[in-house]
Structures are given as structure tokens and as C-alpha cells.
Amino acid sequence: AWATAPLKILDVTIAATGGETDVTSVLDYLAGHYGTARYIAWKLCVRLVADDPSESLVASTADEIYTRRNDVDQLKWVYRHILLSSEFQSTWGEKIKRPIETVVRAMRAANVDLSIRIDHSTSNSIWNRLTDTGHYPFGYDAPTGYPDARSQWQGSGALIMSWRDVTYLLRQPSIVNLAVQTNTGIPDTANRTPNNVVDFWMDRALGYALDNDQAVRIVNFIIESIGGAPDTAIANNTDTADFSKYQKIIRAVLGLILMSPDAMRR
């Protein structure tokens, strides 16, 4: 059924043109309402900046959304507004990665060759492990989706199960060979030292170096595992077989980087 007379909905009168057109008119009105801009601004600021973003940033972002509501590149300018704000640039680390973000980041860092699909053992194992993290895709009961609050994801359960998923991922020879990637990035065998290997994977996985104390701990892990010195080539660094000691060391190095406190923040 449809209206046969004009409808008053919120602050707008909708002409009774019938059926789908009535609904479209209401949705167009809601999409262009300042209240919608305000809500989207708050959601974006919570996602990108902090669980409790400042009123000034939310308000200015809402203004940007509303002012550009008819622009085809609206979101580009909205994101630019948030990312260039002093609050965004001074609050790094206020947010924490949710489990899916942790796993996807590991896949990107390790250049994993995998398409998530059904009836594929490795794919199913990686995906199903997300159930234990509490962040299975599209598995939240409420239509609003999983919470984005830091407190929801910094508990031991979500973190440990995320790390287990990452560890499993890095150990799958059918989709990733980290030793080969290391040797491609450091072609000279003499330069495949603990220091250089750690530097290579920090830059690859994070885009920046961990603080010196964390980096030194990872370098020392290599030395304690197979001997040598920080600036001495790792032994047998041409052996890229699945179960070689060199392969296992590289997997552990990347795992330690991806599970470091800095890597879990955003």
C-alpha cells in the first residue's frame, strides 16, 4: 500500500507520488540531515582517533560531511579532515587492532598467497580460528556490528587467540615462504645478519622500527636460538626448506614483531 495524500515525516513533507518514490524521498532526506552527518562523524572519529574523541573534532567533522553532502568526493575530504587534525596526529596508540585486523595485517606483511574460500583446509582453519578470538566475520548478534572500543579487544583471550591464528598462518608452507622472501630482500648472504633481518621485517611488517629495546630482544632471540652475533651472517641462511632452522627463525622473528605491543596498537 502507499499514501494517497502528502506525508509529514520529521521536518519534511513528502509528496504522495506512490510506492518506492515515497521511500526514496524519505531516505534522501535522512541522508542529507545534519544529524546523520553528526552520527557518521562520531563513528569515524571513534574508529580512527580514540574511543572518546573530542567534541570539537566530532563537530568539525560533522560540518565537513554536511557541507560536502552533495560532493562525489565527499569521503576523501572527510578523511583528510580527520587525518590532518592535531588530535589524530597526537593520539597514535589510543586504539587497538581487532583480531581480524591483526590477522589481515599478518597476511599482508608475509605476502600470503591465499584467497579465503570454502572447502579449502588452510583457509577454513585460519577463518575458523577467528571464532575463538570473539571476532568471527559477520558473527555479532547486534546489527551495529562488533564494538570498536579498546577495552573490548585488549583482554588476554582475544589477544592470545589472535596470536595463535597469526602463528598458524606463518607456518603454512603452501601459502608463504618467509625465508625466500627474506633472501630476496637481502640478496647478499653475508648481509643476512640478525640485525639486518630484524630491520628488514620491521620495515616490511610495520613501516617503522620498534624501539631499540624491543628490537634488541628479537635480535638476541635469534642469537640465543642458533648462535652467532648481531652483525654476523646467520648460519645456513640459504636453506629455505619448510623445516629448516633458518625458516623457523624467520617465522619466529616476524611473529614476534607482529605480536609486539606497538604492532597491536593503531
Image (spheres, rainbow, N blue to C red):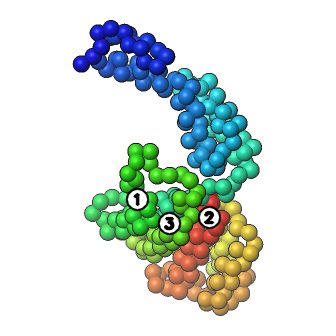
Q: Nearer the viewer, mark 2 or mark 1?
A: 1
Mark 2: which secondary structure? Answer: helix
| SS under mark 1 | loop
Instruction: Please tell me which residue is depicted at 66% across the width and 87% down the height of the picture.
Output: 223
Q: Are marks 2 and 1 in contact (CB under 8 Å)?
A: no
The residue that mark 2 highlights is 263
> What number of labels is visible?
3
Based on the displayed image, in which of its 4 quarters is residue 196 positioned?
Answer: bottom right
Please determine whether, in this image, residue 157 is positioned above or below residue 233.
Answer: above
At a point 74% along the width and 69% down the height, the residue shown is: 211
Return the disc, 2 or 1, that comes first in the chain's sequence: 1
Taking 1 as reference, is 26 left or right?
Answer: right
- Quote the CA–CA distance across marks 2 and 1: 21 Å
Sooner in the amino-acid sequence: mark 2 or mark 3: 3
Residue 240: x and y, percent? 50, 80
- Which callout, 2 or 3, points to the residue nearer the camera? 3
Circle 3 residue: 158
**Separation (CA) of disc 1 from disc 3:** 11 Å
Q: Of the residues shown, which amino acid type is indicated by label 1?
A: Tyr
Amino acid type, residue under disc 3 in the picture: Ala
Q: Is residue 156 left or right of residue 16?
A: right
Say which element carries label 3.
helix
| Viewer can see residue 136 | yes
Label 2 to label 3, Cα distance in Å? 15 Å
Q: Residues within 10 Å of mark 1 (few under 14, many from 20)?
A: some
Badge 2 crowding class, 10 Å Cα cut-off, few under 14, some 14 to 19, many 20 or more, is some
x%, y% of residue 173?
42, 74
Give the amino acid type for the residue marked by disc 2 in the picture. Answer: Ala
Which residue position holds label 1?
136
Left or right of 261 in this view: 21: left
Mark drawn on residue 44: none
